Image (spheres, grey):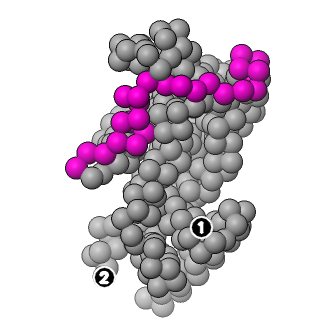
Amino acid sequence: MIRLRKALGVETLPLLVMLALVVVVFALATPRFLTAANLGSMAVQLPVLGLLTLAMLVPILSGGLNLAIIYQANLSGLTLAWVLLSFGGSEAGFGAFVLGTVAAIAVGALSGLIMGLVVAYIGAHPILVSLAMMIFLRGLGEFMTRGGDISGFPDYMRVIGHGDVLGVPVPLLIFLGAALLWHVMLKRTRHGFSVYMVGSNIDAAEYSGLHTKRTLTLIYTISGVICAIAGILMAARFNSVRVGHGEALLLVTVLACFLGGIDPFGGFGKVLPVVLALMILQALSSGLNLLGANQHLSTAVWGLFLIGVMALRWVAQQWNSRRRREI
C-alpha cells in the first residue's frame, strides 16, 4: 500500500478511490450508467471542460489565474467561423479549415501573450489582467456578432466533434494528448521547472537566475493556445459558435484544479490528479442527470464534493502529523 501511494502520489490514490466509489454508486442506482451510450456521451462531453481546465491549470501553478479562458476559446472559435464563412461556409474546403485553425490559434496565443506581457513586465495582478481581457474579448465578440451565433460549418468538421478512432471519440483523444503534453512539459522541460519555481517563490526564482518574465509570458501564451483548441473543438461539436458558449464552465475549471490538488497559491500540483478530478465531476454530472436531477443540483453537488475532499485531506494531514509525533 505504501509503495502504491508513493507511485501514484499523495493526491492521486484518494481520487482513484473516489472515482471508483462514484462509479459503483451510480452503477447500482441506475443500470444505464455503465452502458456504451452513456460512457460515449461522457467521453464526448469531458474534453471541452478538460482542455479549458488545462488552460487554467498552469496559470494557477504559477500563482496566478486566467479568468479569460472561456472568451479566448470562443473568440478563437469565432475566428475559425469567419474564415470558413469567407470561403463559402458549409462549402469551404479543407484548406480553409487549416487556415482558420491557424488564425484561431493565433488569436488565442495573441490574447494570452498580451496578458503575459502585462503580468510579467508591468507587474499587474493576474486576476485584474485576465478580468480586463475577459471583458474586452466578451465585448469585442458581442460587438462583432451582435450577440448572435455563427453556424453552418463543413461536414468534415463533424469528425473532430463526433468522430472516433477504433471506438475512442476524437475529442477524448485530443484531450488526452493535450494532458500528456502538459505532463511532459511540466515534469520534463526547463519551462515546467520554471513554472513551479515561479509559483513557489518568484523572487527566489529570479535570484536563482531564472528568466521569470519570459516564463510568465509563455505561461499565458500557452494557456491562450489551449483555449483556442478548445474553441475549435466546441465549434466542431456544436456546429455553431457564439461569444457566450460555456460561460458556466469557468468556475468549474477552477474547481477541477483545486479538487485535483493544485495549490491555489501556486508551486504544487500534477496533471494526472486533475484529469481524475475531471472524470469524477463528469461522472457525478452524468449520474445525476440519469437519475433525473436538475442540472443546478449537479453544480451544488460539485461544490459539496470539493468541501468534502478538503475535509478528508485535513483529516489525513492530522492523522499523518500524529503518526509522525508518535514515531
Q: Which residue is mark 2?
A: 1
- Relative placement, left or right, of 150 versus 87 is right
Q: Residues within 10 Å of mark 1 (few under 14, many from 20)?
A: some
**Closest to the observer, 309 or 142:** 142
Secondary structure type for disc 1: helix
Q: Which residue is mark 1?
A: 289
Residues shaded magenta? 142-166
Locate residue 313, reporting x and y percent: 56, 74
Q: Are marks 2 and 1 in contact (CB under 8 Å)?
A: no
Locate residue 81, reporting x and y percent: 54, 20
- Label 2 amino acid? Met
Locate residue 296, reporting x and y percent: 72, 63
Q: Which quadrant is home to the C terminus?
A: bottom left
Q: Residue furthest bottom?
A: 326
Closer to us: mark 2 or mark 1? 1
Locate residue 163, reporting x and y percent: 35, 42
